[in-house]
Image (cartoon, helix red, strand yellow):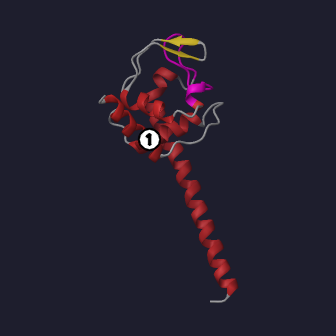
Amino acid sequence: MDNSKIRCFVIGALMMFLFVSIKTQAQNVENGKKIYETRCLVCHQADGGGVPNMNAPLDGATNVVGNDITRLVRIIKYGFNERVELDGLYYSNSMTPNPDLTPAQISDVLSYIRSSWSNKATKVTTVQVQQGIKGSQKTSTK
């Protein structure tokens, strides 16, 4: 093969990889939206605004767009049953656990939440979710 054929092959392969990567990311966010609509919307609302004094908002909340992915993973997977302060306001409704969600599904729903409404945070990978679950299992056995 001459250099021009090799160059065309490499460019074509890179374009295909980029297309598949973008399509996969879009599909994951779309999957996350479906999970949100069936599992989260009732309490956190269609606009991510939550319910005052009961269910914390997800739109614009510092904990949601922050860097503590493990905390978010634990809350989704294992639930949360404490009064919580979020951006100066308190919320008291329990978050039900979702033990049946796979790491990929948790990744999808967190990626959707962290990139929806006014949120502009990074997407969450399945590896981050697996590490969060693994880390919470270590701390829960102490």
Q: Residue 120: percent from the left, percent from the top? A: 65, 36
Total label count? 1
The magenta stretch spans residue 78: no
Instruction: Answer with the quarter of the image where residue 138 lies.
Output: top left
Q: Residue furthest bottom?
A: 1
| Outermost residue, left side | 141
Compared across the picture, whether 78 is left or right of 124 comes to: left
Please give left or right for residue 38 compared with residue 27 in the image: left
Q: Which residue is mark 1?
A: 129
Q: Is residue 47 visible?
A: no
Give whichever of 127, 47 is nearer the camera.
127
- Assess whether residue 57 is covered by the magenta stretch: yes
Which residue is found at the position 37% from the left and 38% from the top? 101
Give neighbour class at mark 1: few <14, some 14-19, many 20+ (Cα, 10 Å): many
Q: Amino acid at mark 1?
A: Val
Q: Position of residue 22 (x, y in %)?
A: 59, 54
Quadrant housing the N terminus: bottom right
Q: Position of residue 133 (x, y in %)?
A: 38, 38
Residue 123 lies, with reference to residue 86, above or below; the image says below
Question: Which residue lies most toward the front here?
Answer: 142
- The quarter of the rendered structure image containing the C terminus is top left
Highlighted magenta segment, given as a residue range: 49-64
Q: Position of residue 66 (x, y in %)?
A: 58, 31
Residue 32 seen anywhere in this rendered image of the structure: yes
**In terms of secondary structure, what is the magenta stretch mainly?**
loop
Q: Is residue 42 above or below residue 111?
A: above
- Of all residues, the one furthest to the right in this rendering is 4
91 over 75 or under it: above or below: above
Q: Is residue 101 left or right of residue 44?
A: left
Callout 1: SS = helix
Residue at the spot 41% in from the left edge and 31% down from the top edge? 74
32 left or right of 14 in image: left
